Image (spheres, rainbow, N blue to C red):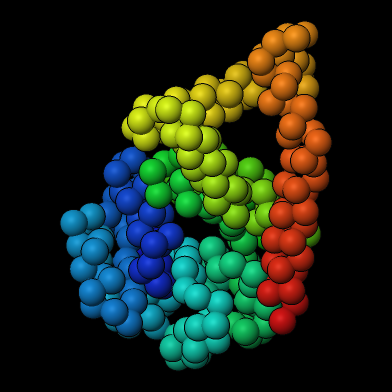
Amino acid sequence: MKKRFKLGVIGCGFMAHAVLRGVVLSDFLSEKKIIVSDVSEEALGKVADLGVRTTTDNAYVAENSEFLLFAVKPQNFEETVKSLAGYKPEKVISVIVGLKKNTIKNSIGIGAVKVARCMPNLPCSIGSGVIGVDMSDFNKSMDDLEFISNVFGCLGTVLSVDEVKMDAVTGISGSGPAYAFMFIDSLIDAGVKQGLAKNEAKILAVQTVLGAAEMVQRDEQSISELVMQVCSKGGTTIEAVKVLEEKNFCGIIDEAVSACVKRAKELSER
């Protein structure tokens, strides 16, 4: 039976809001084809300007949507499933951190449920994110694969990955913006200490990181070759690079990512 809505979203927090804005403002999907539910009227009010249908009835959303996107906190998922009043959705998309596909399926119960597990990141809120997505349950339907890819394509770059890699995705891109923010903030602080005004240091740091990232994306050279292009024997950059190497800069990043991935695994195995 044809559903009234193409996309139903349960939970209207930050990431759900980002998804809805991306989908509606890109004109990928008409707001008339989207319905959102949340226990908070205040949260629903924040998406009113998008023109999507809103309700506090999760069961209604599940029953009337072809694709059901869960965007609730992990600790609230079981309660959310209960609120579906026994209805078992067939096509599920999850942006819930640390919740495996089998956990979602087992909670929903016996049925032909297919689950796409997604790991978006904070820059998705401005259309510059990256989203790791396991869509393997939908491999027999190109239409379904295309729809899921397009939903998240409105938020940034979509990378199709197997679920076993999702914890690593969390460590690199899910949590990665925090590492980048800290690096940029450190550059700004260092610039101020060297006599720059804070706004000057911010412009220099931000544009330098943006430009460097663009070169890595575009250039066919390896990153180590790009590093050496900036360095010259007896010059200034090589002195800075020596300090970073002596302080084990790469090792610190590796340890940080490993700690993040370890915690992601712990959360997903609860």
Q: Judge from the rendering whether residue 33 lies leftward or rightward of residue 241; answer left or right.
A: left
Q: Position of residue 5 (x, y in %)?
A: 35, 63
| Res 2 seen here | no
| Res 195 seen here | yes
Residue 183: name its quadrant.
top right
Q: Is residue 52 above or below residue 178?
A: below
Q: Judge from the rendering whether residue 245 lies leftward or rightward of residue 104; answer left or right.
A: right
For the N terminus, the quadrant is bottom left
Q: Position of residue 174 (x, y in %)?
A: 59, 54
Q: Position of residue 77 (x, y in %)?
A: 53, 81
Q: Is residue 130 above or below residue 268?
A: above
Q: How many marks?
A: 0
* Picture residue at 79% right of the left edge, 41% below the top: 248
* Picture residue at 38% right of the left edge, 43% below the top: 126
* Picture residue at 54% right of the left edge, 47% below the top: 182
Q: Nearer the viewer, residue 202 or 148?
A: 202
Residue 35: name its quadrant.
bottom left
Q: Position of residue 4 (x, y in %)?
A: 33, 66
Q: Nearer the viewer, residue 159 or 178?
A: 178
* Picture residue at 73% right of the left edge, 34% below the top: 244
Q: Nearer the viewer, residue 3 or 57?
A: 57
For the C terminus, the quadrant is bottom right
Q: Judge from the rendering whether residue 38 lies leftward or rightward of residue 193; answer left or right.
A: left
Residue 262: name its quadrant.
bottom right
Q: Judge from the rendering whether residue 39 lies leftward or rightward of residue 207; answer left or right.
A: left
Q: Is residue 27 above or below residue 100?
A: above
